[in-house]
């Protein structure tokens, strides 16, 4: 697959792979996709979750296969002519069974409609955004949420916070951009347990940027934001665009920035480094995130 967009910085665009399951159109960020394969011979795993078909091992790498027909609640219409979308995110290698792959579309995050709470709220739904393309509605699935519900141990490792022990309360203002309501709550709870209690959480890069520019207008950035934490995948404005805007502004460029995302692979890490992120942490390593926050704030002081 040709991913030229991964070489660009701060364009606020992404490539979406469109695919079909049971006659419905869905999408996934190409940055999560390793390869697309015809259906493979799958070895079943005894006593596994009903949505896990089993595993296969191409080129010595074990890949778990999940059935999107089952996950999305459709009758099992799977056939030998189905395709596998092999992904890598959260340091996991997972193949998803789909009916067919339609193509790749390059779109702006501004063109992605954020679902309302009935579709994407905490405890509901599996969508992070919707695109209208050629009269079709393409629902971008929340694959992290899908995997977390099937394998809860892949979620944020909040137990790592307990191992940090008693910590002093810290009122340093931290701004967080994270579009998932579920992850926002988990990150907030984890950081507060780690002692960081002055948190402002926004649902995308644009909302976070609005906070920063308002503080700048009122000469209060130095008091209102001492550290920025951002996801990458977010509607309206993604995390890379947010990092670029901050680093391109003379008054803001020294704000410490941490990218906390499921997409910290080699290509995306290179992109984050080029944009000027101080650190990049792969979800679900919340304990590592706390240590990096500690170090960056200590250096800033």
Image (cartoon, rainbow, N blue to C red):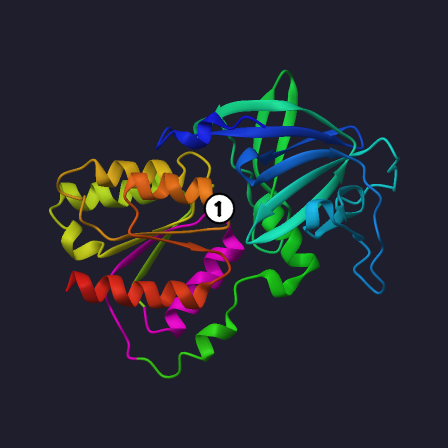
Q: 166 above or below 105?
A: below
Q: Quick one: SS at disc 1?
A: loop
Mark 1 crowd level (few <14, some 14–19, many ≥20, 10 Å Cα): some
Q: Which residue is drawn at 65% across and 28% down?
A: 18
Of residue 7 and residue 193, the one placed in the foreground of this image is 7
Quadrant assignment for the C terminus: bottom left
- Span of residues in magenta: 168-196
On the image, which quarter does residue 211 sit in? top left
Q: Residue at x 75, y 43 (%)?
A: 68
Q: 41 above or below 285?
A: above
Residue 169: within the magenta? yes
Give the residue furthest to the left: 219
In the image, 145: left or right of 240? Answer: right
Residue 165: within the magenta? no
Q: Mark 1 points at which residue?
A: 265
x%, y% of residue 3?
51, 28
x%, y% of residue 91?
56, 54
In the image, 248: left or right of 146? Answer: left
In the image, 155: left or right of 147? Answer: left
Q: Which residue is drawn at 47% across and 62% down?
A: 285
Q: Residue at x 34, y 68 (%)?
A: 291
């Amino acid at each position: 697959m040709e991913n030229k967009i991964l070489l660009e910085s701060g364009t606020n665009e992404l490539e979406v792979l469109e695919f079909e399951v049971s006659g419905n159109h869905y999408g996934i960020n190409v940055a999560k996709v390793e390869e697309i394969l015809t259906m493979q011979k799958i070895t079943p795993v005894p006593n596994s979750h009903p949505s896990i078909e089993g595993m296969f091992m191409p080129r010595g790498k074990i890949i778990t296969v999940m059935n999107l027909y089952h996950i999305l609640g459709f009758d099992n219409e799977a056939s030998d002519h189905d395709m596998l979308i092999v992904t890598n995110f959260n340091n996991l290698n997972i193949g998803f069974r789909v009916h067919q792959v339609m193509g790749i579309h390059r779109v702006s995050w501004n063109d992605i409609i954020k679902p309302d709470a009935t579709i994407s709220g905490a405890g509901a739904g599996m969508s992070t955004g919707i695109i209208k393309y050629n009269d079709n509605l393409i629902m971008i699935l929340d694959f992290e949420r899908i995997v977390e519900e099937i394998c809860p141990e892949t979620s944020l490792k909040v137990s790592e916070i307990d191992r940090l022990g008693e910590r002093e309360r810290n009122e340093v203002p931290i701004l967080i951009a994270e579009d998932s309501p579920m992850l926002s709550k988990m990150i907030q709870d984890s950081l507060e347990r780690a002692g960081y209690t002055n948190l402002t959480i926004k649902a995308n890069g644009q909302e976070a940027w609005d906070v920063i520019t308002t503080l700048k207008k009122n000469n209060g950035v130095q008091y209102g934001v001492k550290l920025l934490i951002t996801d990458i995948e977010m509607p309206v404005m993604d995390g890379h665009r947010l990092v670029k805007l901050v680093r391109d502004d003379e008054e803001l460029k020294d704000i410490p920035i941490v990218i906390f995302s499921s997409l910290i692979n080699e290509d995306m890490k290179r992109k984050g480094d080029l944009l000027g992120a101080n650190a990049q942490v792969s979800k679900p390593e919340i304990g590592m995130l706390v240590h990096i926050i500690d170090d960056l704030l200590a250096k800033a002081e």
